[in-house]
């Protein structure tokens, strides 16, 4: 097994059902990844350690998901030069809007590529595309994935039109 290229982290194990969609996409494109719980508020020292060691451990992209006062993706982005993809996880009270706004509204200079509420699938695809920008085999898998999506929709169009 080679070293993980994508780090998939989340604030709580309660985020796992959502974040597992990112795991699935990394698996689909054959990308090595690691999954862990890192909480900005409950394990702040771990957050710093994880973010600061990410480059030397060989990670290329970090996907960070959190709900509520979702400070995890932004804090990771503040602590690493790697690209960070933020996943707002829908909590029980504010339908995920709290999480979305906590993640998306970053100050200039510290970007987090924010996907939709519970959009972990797209986070996994985007991370794969970033890895694929420097790897033709992965790029090819992404092209095939897009072609399959196109074909699925076109077969529905043809059925409706006939
Ligand atoms: C956030 O608080 C986590 O990312 C999670 O979405 C939310 C609730 O966490 P638990 O109370 O379920 O552990 O930090």
Image (cartoon, grey):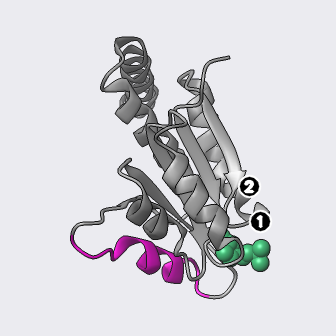
From what the image shows, is residue 60 above or below residue 11? above
Q: Quick check: marks 1 and 2 in contact, CB under 8 Å?
A: yes
Q: Quadrant of ligand 1?
A: bottom right
Judge: label 2 CB < 8 Å from ligand 1.
no
Secondary structure state at the residue bearing disc 2: helix
Quadrant of residue 127 within the rendered picture:
top left
Vertical placement of residue 49 versus 39, above or below:
above
Q: Is residue 49 highlighted in magenta? A: no
User: Residue 129 is drawn in which quadrant?
Assistant: top left
Task: Give residue 42's position: percent from left, percent from top.
Answer: 71, 76
Q: Is residue 99 magenta?
A: yes
How many tags in the picture?
2
Name the residue at 55% across, 75% down: 70
Label 1 beta carbon less than 8 Å to ligand 1: yes
Mark 1 and mark 2: span between their CA atoms? 7 Å
Q: Position of residue 90 (x, y in %)?
A: 61, 72
- Looking at the rendering, the stretch of residues picked out in magenta corresponds to 94-108
Q: Look at mark 1 in the image and give the residue it sits on.
A: 14
Q: Position of residue 85 (x, y in %)?
A: 43, 54
Which residue is at 68% across, 45% downward?
35
Considering depth in this image, is 50 or 21 the residue closer to the camera? Answer: 50
Q: Quick one: label 2, few (<14), some, or many (20+) residues within 10 Å?
A: few
| Residue drawn at (65%, 78%) of the image | 41
- Per the image, the residue denoted by label 2 is 17
């Amino acid at each position: 097994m080679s070293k993980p290229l994508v780090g998939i982290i989340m604030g709580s194990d309660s985020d796992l059902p959502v974040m597992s969609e990112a795991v699935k996409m990394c698996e689909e494109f054959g990308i090595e990844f690691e999954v862990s719980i890192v909480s900005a508020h409950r394990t702040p020292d771990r957050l710093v350690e994880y973010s600061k060691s990410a480059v030397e451990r060989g990670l290329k992209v970090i996907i960070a998901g959190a709900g509520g006062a979702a400070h995890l993706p932004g804090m990771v982005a503040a602590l690493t030069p790697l690209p960070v993809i933020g996943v707002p996880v829908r909590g029980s009270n504010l339908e995920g809007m709290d999480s979305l706004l906590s993640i998306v509204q970053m100050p200039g200079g510290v970007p987090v590529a924010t996907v939709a509420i519970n959009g972990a699938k797209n986070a996994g695809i985007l991370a794969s595309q970033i890895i694929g920008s420097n790897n033709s085999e992965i790029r090819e898998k992404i092209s095939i994935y897009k072609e399959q999506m196109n074909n699925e929709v076109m077969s529905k169009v043809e059925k409706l039109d006939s």
